[in-house]
Image: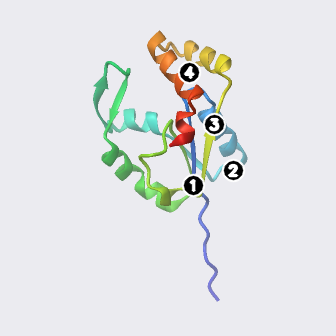
């Protein structure tokens, strides 16, 4: 008799920057060490999965196809907590659970300010949180 080997679930943690995605992922990995946390922004920088820098939005211009290709094997294997501020670039089949994290705007503002965000970037991200942009993706 053969027993099916179940894979660990893949989880997408999404939300406005500063809502606690990385902290939540770290807490989950501490409780279930077999899970692997992948912070997409770090992956993009380390593997150069971008097409340069966008001065207006103060961020890298993602090469979505290369990024998804880079993630494919890990996602197929399972046990990944993917941490990113958006959900719409990833295939739905990758995830067993999607969690949209939220934060009170006064807390969020302080967190982003401590990261050195410009006033423009602060305003855009707080507005995205107010409008629940990540939730609607």
Name the residue carrying label 1.
10
Q: Which of marks 2 and 1 is nearer the N terminus?
A: 1
Residue at mark 2 to residue at mark 1: CA–CA distance: 13 Å
Q: Residue 101 carries which label?
A: 3
> Does dot 1 land on a helix, a strand or a loop?
loop
Q: Do the residues labelled 3 and 2 touch (CB within 8 Å)?
A: no
Residue drawn at (50%, 12%) of the image: 116
Of the two numbered discs 2 and 4 in the rendering, the one whose residue sits closer to the viewer: 4
Q: Residue furthest bottom?
A: 1
**Above or below 103: residue 101:** below
Residue at mark 3 to residue at mark 2: CA–CA distance: 20 Å
Q: Do the residues labelled 2 and 4 touch (CB within 8 Å)?
A: no
Name the residue carrying label 4.
126
Q: Do the residues labelled 1 and 3 touch (CB within 8 Å)?
A: no
Residue at mark 1 to residue at mark 3: CA–CA distance: 16 Å
Of the two numbered discs 3 and 4 in the rendering, the one whose residue sits closer to the viewer: 4
Name the residue carrying label 2.
32
Of the two numbered discs 4 and 1 in the rendering, the one whose residue sits closer to the viewer: 4
Residue drawn at (57%, 28%) of the image: 129
Q: Earlier in the sequence, mark 3 or mark 2?
A: 2
> Does dot 4 land on a helix, a strand or a loop?
helix
Residue 56 located left or right of residue 131: left
Q: Which residue lies furthest to the top in this view?
A: 119
Residue drawn at (66%, 37%) of the image: 24
**Above or below 75: residue 87:** above
């Amino acid at each position: 008799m053969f027993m099916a080997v179940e894979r660990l679930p893949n989880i997408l943690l999404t939300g406005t920057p500063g809502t606690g995605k990385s902290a939540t992922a770290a807490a989950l990995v501490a409780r279930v060490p077999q899970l692997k946390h992948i912070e997409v922004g770090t992956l993009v920088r380390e593997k150069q999965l971008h097409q340069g820098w966008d001065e207006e939005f103060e961020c890298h211009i993602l090469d979505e196809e290369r990024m998804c290709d880079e993630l494919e094997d890990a996602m197929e294997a399972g046990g990944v907590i993917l941490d990113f501020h958006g959900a719409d670039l990833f295939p739905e089949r990758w995830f067993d659970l999607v969690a949209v994290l939220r934060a009170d705007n006064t807390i969020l503002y302080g967190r982003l300010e401590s990261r050195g965000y410009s006033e423009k970037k602060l305003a855009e991200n707080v507005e995205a949180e107010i409008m629940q942009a990540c939730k609607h993706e």
